[in-house]
Amino acid sequence: MPKRTPADIAPRDVLARYHRAIYDVCADDLAALYAEDAVHEFPLLFPGMPRRLIGREQIRDTYRAAWAAASSVVTLEAIRNVVIHETKDPEVIVVEQEVTGAVSTTGRRIDAWGVLVMRVRDGSLLHVRDYLDALRINHALGRLPAIIADLPSQ
C-alpha cells in the first residue's frame, strides 16, 4: 500500500485522530495534529480556558493542564452522535457531537453538545472553533455559582 502524504490526509481523518487523542487524554497526540502556528478558539464562554490558543505548544500546554486538573474528577465515556458536515471549502468540516461522561465524586452525568469548525490543510489543523456547552459541564461539576459570581456585571 502506498504511503500517504500529508496532502492525502482528509479533514475526516484528522477528526478521527482528534477524537482518539481525547479518548486517550493525550495532549501530545492532540498537539501533533495542529500546525505549528495553528489557532484553537472557544468563541462561547468556557470558564477556565482562554478564549484563544495560538500555536501548537500553547494548545499542548493548555490541554495538558486542563486534562490533568479534570482527570481525578471527570471520566469521559463517549463522543457520540457525531455528524460531519462537508462544506464547499474542502479544507473545512463542521462537526456536531455529544460528549458524555460522569463526575467521579458525585456520579452526576455530563452530556454536553458541541460543534467544531475545523480547517485542515496538508493533514494538519490550522484553525478550530470549539463551541462546547461548557456551562452544562460546569453545572455537573457544581461550579456554576462560582462562575456566575465571577462574571462581569456589564
Image (cartoon, helix red, strand yellow):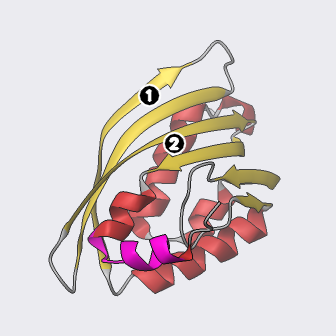
Outermost residue on the front side: it is: 153
Q: In which quadrant will I find the C terminus? A: bottom right
Residue 150, picture quadrant? bottom right
Q: Is residue 44 above or below residue 108?
A: above
Q: Earlier in the sequence, mark 2 or mark 1?
A: 2
Amino acid marked by disc 2: Leu
Magenta portion: prevailing SS class: helix
Which segment did they paint magenta? 140-149
Question: Does the image show residue 84?
Answer: yes
Q: Amino acid at mark 1?
A: Ile
- Residue drawn at (49%, 84%) of the image: 68
Q: Secondary structure at mark 2?
A: helix
User: Within the magenta stretch, is there residue 144?
Assistant: yes
Taking the spot 38% from the left edge, 69% from the top edge, the residue there is 138
Percent x, y of residue 75? 28, 73
Left or right, 80 with reference to 64: left
List the residue tagged with mark 2. 15
Q: Residue furthest left?
A: 107
Residue 37 drawn at (x, y percent): 85, 54
**Snapshot quadrant of residue 65:** bottom right
Left or right of 9, for residue 47: left
Report the disc number at residue 84.
Answer: 1
The answer to which image quadrant residue 25 occupies is bottom left
**In front here: 21 or 93?**
93
Q: Position of residue 21 (x, y in %)?
A: 49, 61
The local crowd at label 2, few if under 14, some if 14 to 19, many if 20 or more residues have their Cα within 10 Å, is some
Does residue 148 show up magenta in the picture?
Answer: yes
Q: Residue at x 64, y 73 (%)?
A: 62
